[in-house]
Image (cartoon, rainbow, N blue to C red):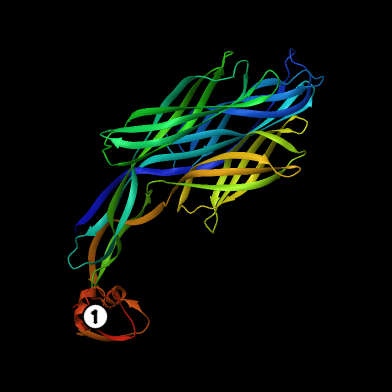
Amino acid sequence: MELNQTSISYYDKRLARISTCTETTDSIVPDTFPDIGRVVCAYGTAAVKDQTPQSGRLLISGAVQVTVLYEPEKGGGLRRLSIPVSFAHIEECEGLDADAVCAVSCHAAAVDAAAVNSRKLSVSIQLCFAIEGYCQTACEITETVGIPHVELLSTMQAVTLVDQARAYPITVLDDVNLQDASGLSLLHTSCTMRTAECRAMHGKVVLKGEACIQCLALQEDDAVRVLTSSTPFTQILEMPDAEDGDTVDAQLAVREADCRLEADGLLSYTVSAQVVCLLRHARALRRIDDLYLPGKSLQMQEEKTTLHSMPPLVPFSAEVTETLQTAQHVSHVISAEACCCGAKRSAEGELQLTAAVQILYLGDDQQLCALQRMLPLTAACTAVGEVSQIALAARASSAGEKGLLLTVTVSGMASAEEHCPFRHITAAEAGEQQRDNDGVTLLLRYVGAEQRLWDIAKDCGTTVDAIRRANELAAEAASAANTMLLIPIQV
């Protein structure tokens, strides 16, 4: 007996989900600050300090810098409170191990600050985590069986496997002189990172992209402004065995964005991020669908093996509009933000999202107001397969007497992933003769409904080729229907 075994080693995606958790805290207004009259808005900037995979779980810890903007009880201009809140989150995942390569993105999706009294705030933060985890795995599959006279039904199966998964820390920093930004103070900072190019090159990965910063800043006259800046970057990352032309992609996750705005309008920022690079290779493997030994039993020991085929990612985008009601007429929209807190494909292929939306605007009386909602959104998505790396960009405008027209642009990646079953035959040998044919060497059999020649041959203890020759069937004939067949019997 000879078994042609193929050893497979690759990285399997064990964890891929978006999850949320809520952190709460109470904060006392410092003695140097006036009493709270009205909370205008609250924002949070999350920073991941550590992520540690363990057996069956992933530990994530960090801190959220919460900024609360409020009007004092007796007037006197807007005041800003900074409240640090630490968090620790455990993501359970069967099969995850300590060597897993994980990509973690964390956002403060929604921040609610309520005045308990004039000197105390109750703060609630909904954190959103987008997580992927890859574990190295090894298995064997059987592509052929070298037993004399064995009949083998097999097909070629194309799979794309992740041969390497590596995580790298990167840092992007810049100093930007902003026009007309003197005397501003920062309220809130958000950062997104985009990949422009990712290619393999002789044991390395060349990664090019852009770090985009958006800040809310408060002027001395209490007006809120939006400041934006972007910094291109290039990183050369070590990846052994990567060659020119290999398929490699990168997932960027901001861990922390530290921004400072000087009195003279100099914006300095340092962005700490993590890059997870995946090197994919396509392979063609022979899958054994069925096998038998004509006229004899075949004794086998086998295991079922499943390979997770993960083709290259395909970008997709869509746009969704919603009309939101407000308590007053909106004269001017200052900013709009949206964060994806959940995503799934519907039976019709549409993308069903849960989005945390926050809009800062001015009413007719020029009073600063904020609207915060958790919205269900449905986006058309023609891309096939599992979706990941979903990002939302929001913009809003006044609509009617008391309303806002919200437009959300959805972007992300999709991959037609597939779990492909294979057989791993560990032992096989010929057994005893299955039946006594009493000297019969030829059968006449009527086939009504269409039936595979393979099933007929296996049932009668012969071969497909023997049936084709006896009935002068074409070499490519695979089935028969409404006909009489001569079936030679193996002795």
Mark 1, Cα crowd under 10 Å, few <14 / some 14-19 / many 20+, is: few
Question: Amino acid type of disc 1?
Answer: Asp
Q: Is residue 329 left or right of residue 438?
A: right
Position of 491 relative to 77 (above/below): below
Front-most of residues 106 and 424: 106
Figure quadrant of residue 326: top right
Horizontal and vertical percent for residue 91? 53, 38
Front-most of residues 87 and 439: 87
Residue at image coords 21%, 85%: 442
Residue at image coords 22%, 55%: 4
Front-most of residues 389 and 164: 389
Residue at image coords 34%, 85%: 482
Q: Looking at this view, name the residue that lies furthest to the front.
A: 179
Q: Looking at this view, name the residue that lies furthest to the right.
A: 74
Position of 151 relative to 447 (above/below): above
Figure quadrant of residue 62: top right
Horizontal and vertical percent for residue 211? 47, 29
Q: Quadrant of the C terminus?
A: bottom left
Q: Which residue is mark 1?
A: 436
Q: Quadrant of the N terminus?
A: bottom left
Position of 286 relative to 253 (above/below): below
Horizontal and vertical percent for residue 435? 26, 78
Figure quadrant of residue 340: top right
Horizontal and vertical percent for residue 285? 28, 54
Q: Is residue 346 left or right of residue 462?
A: right
- For mark 1, give the secondary structure: loop
Q: Is residue 480 visible?
A: yes
Q: How many marks?
A: 1
Q: Is residue 100 visible?
A: no
